[in-house]
């Protein structure tokens, strides 16, 4: 029986983010679908030493010892020399678009190894046509070996009774989710919200749910007296509760490889306002409202329009639930297994 080895280290981290939730959900989906004779082995930890040493030295040796028929790296770093065909998932090329958001060492690793991994892989999986086209244009990857397989909402849906005792607050709030990095365009959101709070008297708070990677002080300064809160990293239960209670989720990032955060909000019936950029329109379709990210005033206009129109938010909630239901990890896993079978 052919053995497929999956580098599942990201699924077992202590603080999961987008790529970790992808790995966790993909593994769960693969466990539930008919693999038709494929045997899976998941690598859960890399052991002692640098990640690079595991990815490029230890993992190939493991593949050789196990006589693996295929290896899948769910986050960019495929072994460049390997004893079997390789599949790599590349979510986006944000490290190329926003290099300053990454430490020098991390940036160097991504920019040197990801192009090599993409070119050497027998198959590349991307979550959107946007990422596929970016990959082909930047790195000259052969389009015929790229497969677009959308993701699905990955944050566990919690118990609504828990929410009543968790992040509930009588004051309405807007929410943005993601680590506080320049590429997230949170400065534009904070400015637009502060202007509305000051000039239009909106009664809302703005909650930024994500790890402060150095942007927090700048965002607080931009907020001035406006009620902007930074939560830091949140576990699944608290993030789920915060999403359920938001009056509106705003996703202002002008470069997204899929837009998982928007889909998570839709799965909870939370209306979404997103930048008309990257893969966001592809993922959210007509179930989100949009603003033009390069128009400094459009975000404020769209925010005010939605915050003062209950019917519009209700319609977005309805459409969002229907849109999120179109995506499933069972489908993602089945299409991923089909890629394995192409090579085996």
Image (spheres, grey):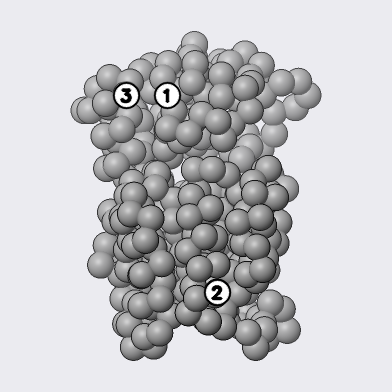
Decide which of 223, 76 is in the foreground and name it.
223
Q: Is residue 13 left or right of residue 332?
A: right
Q: For the C terminus, give its image quadrant.
A: top left
SS of the residue under disc 1: strand
Q: Residue at x 37, y 61 (%)?
A: 297
Picture coordinates of residue 332, whole percent (x, y) = 38, 51
- Labelled disc at residue 198: 2
Against 115, is 185 above or below? Answer: below
Which residue in the protein does label 3 denote?
A: 138
Between circles 3 and 1, the one closer to the viewer is 3
Say whether disc 3 or disc 1 marks the residue closer to the N-terminus: 1
Which residue of the protein is positioned furthest toward the right in this rendering?
48
- Determine the image quadrant of residue 58: top right
Q: Residues within 10 Å of mark 2 (few under 14, many from 20)?
A: few
Between circles 2 and 3, the one closer to the viewer is 2
Decide which of 232, 117 is in the foreground and name it.
232
Q: Is residue 192 left or right of residue 310?
A: right
Q: Mark 3 and mark 1: span between their CA atoms? A: 21 Å
Say whether disc 1 or disc 2 marks the residue closer to the N-terminus: 1
Picture coordinates of residue 337, whole percent (x, y) = 37, 42
Picture coordinates of residue 272, whole percent (x, y) = 41, 69
Decide which of 312, 41 is in the foreground and name it.
312
Q: Mark 2 and mark 3: span between their CA atoms? A: 43 Å
SS of the residue under disc 3: helix
- Labelled disc at residue 86: 1
Q: Is residue 133 left or right of residue 203?
A: left
Between circles 1 and 2, the one closer to the viewer is 2
Q: Are marks 2 and 3 in contact (CB under 8 Å)?
A: no
Q: Is residue 127 left or right of residue 72?
A: left
Picture coordinates of residue 319, whole percent (x, y) = 31, 76
Against 53, is 165 above or below? Answer: below
Q: Residue at x 31, y 33 (%)?
A: 134
């Amino acid at each position: 029986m052919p053995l497929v080895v999956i580098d599942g280290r990201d699924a077992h981290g202590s603080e999961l983010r987008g790529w970790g939730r992808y790995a966790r959900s993909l593994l769960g989906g693969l466990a539930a679908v008919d693999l038709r004779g494929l045997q899976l082995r998941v690598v859960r930890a890399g052991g002692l030493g640098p990640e690079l040493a595991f990815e490029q030295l230890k993992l190939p040796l493991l593949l050789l010892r196990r006589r693996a028929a295929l290896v899948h790296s769910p986050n960019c770093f495929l072994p460049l020399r390997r004893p079997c065909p390789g599949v790599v998932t590349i979510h986006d090329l944000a490290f190329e678009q926003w290099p300053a958001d990454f430490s020098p060492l991390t940036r160097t690793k991504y920019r040197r190894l990801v192009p090599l991994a993409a070119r050497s892989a027998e198959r590349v999986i991307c979550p959107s046509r946007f990422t596929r086209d970016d990959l082909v244009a930047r790195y000259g990857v052969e389009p015929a070996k790229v497969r677009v397989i959308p993701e699905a909402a990955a944050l566990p849906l919690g118990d609504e009774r828990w929410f009543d005792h968790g992040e509930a607050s009588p004051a309405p709030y807007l929410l943005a989710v993601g680590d506080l990095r320049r590429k997230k365009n949170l400065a534009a959101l904070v400015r637009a919200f502060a202007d509305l709070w000051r000039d239009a008297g909106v009664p809302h708070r703005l909650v930024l749910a994500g790890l402060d990677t150095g942007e927090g002080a700048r965002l607080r300064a931009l907020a001035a007296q406006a009620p902007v809160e930074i939560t830091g990293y949140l576990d699944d239960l608290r993030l789920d509760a915060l999403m359920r209670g938001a009056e509106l989720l705003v996703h202002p990032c002008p470069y997204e490889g899929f837009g998982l955060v928007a889909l998570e909000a839709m799965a909870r019936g939370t209306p979404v306002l997103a930048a008309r950029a990257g893969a966001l329109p592809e993922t959210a379709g007509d179930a989100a409202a949009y603003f033009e990210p390069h128009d400094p005033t459009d975000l404020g206009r769209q925010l005010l329009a939605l915050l003062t129109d209950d019917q519009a938010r209700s319609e977005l909630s309805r459409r969002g639930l229907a849109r999120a239901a179109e995506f499933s990890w069972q489908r993602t896993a089945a299409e991923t297994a089909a890629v394995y079978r192409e090579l085996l």
